[in-house]
Amino acid sequence: MTIEVNSNIVDFVEGETIAQLLKRMNFVFPLIVVKIDGVLVKKTDFDSTTFPDGASIQMIHLISGG
């Protein structure tokens, strides 16, 4: 059982939320966009949104500057 995160295959954990996956993948960026199978997940939903086995997840950190 696996998922794809940013084109990398990682183990699927039943019931894991986006927030937990971010922590497991060491994504600590303050500005991040997450899509599950192409569908945008609101940051306010990271703690409650889970994903199925085989999901394709994109985690894109945004960089701001001037």
Image (spheres, helix red, strand yellow):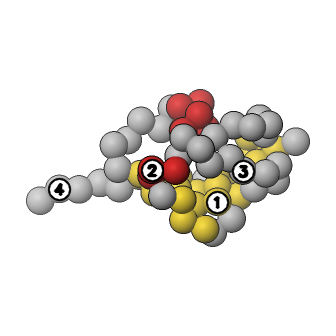
Nearer the observer, disc 2 or disc 1?
2
Nearer the observer, disc 2 or disc 4?
2
- Report helix, strand or loop for mark 2: helix
Q: Earlier in the sequence, mark 2 or mark 3?
A: 2
Q: Amino acid at mark 1?
A: Ile
- Report helix, strand or loop for mark 1: strand
The residue lying at 41 percent from left, 35 percent from top is: 28
Quadrant where the image shows the N terminus: top right
The residue lying at 63 percent from left, 69 percent from top is: 38
Mark 1, residue position:
36
Q: How far from the left and from the top, in percent, is residue 9?
A: 74, 46
Nearer the observer, disc 1 or disc 4?
1
Q: Earlier in the sequence, mark 3 or mark 4?
A: 3
User: In the image, which disc is placed on residue 51?
Assistant: 3
Mark 2, residue position:
44
Q: Residues within 10 Å of mark 4 (few under 14, many from 20)?
A: few
Q: Amino acid at mark 4?
A: Gly
Q: CA distance from mark 2 to mark 4?
A: 24 Å
- Report helix, strand or loop for mark 3: loop
In this rendering, position of residue 66 left or right of residue 54:
left
The residue lying at 68 percent from left, 47 percent from top is: 50
Is 44 or 52 nearer to us in this picture? 44
Q: Earlier in the sequence, mark 3 or mark 1?
A: 1
Q: CA distance from mark 2 to mark 3?
A: 16 Å
Quarter of image, res 64: bottom left
- Report helix, strand or loop for mark 4: loop
Q: Amino acid at mark 2?
A: Thr
Q: CA distance from mark 2 to mark 1?
A: 15 Å
Is 38 or 43 nearer to us in this picture? 43
**Is there CB contact under 8 Å for labels 2 and 4?**
no
User: In the image, which disc is placed on residue 65?
Assistant: 4
Q: Residues within 10 Å of mark 3 (few under 14, many from 20)?
A: some
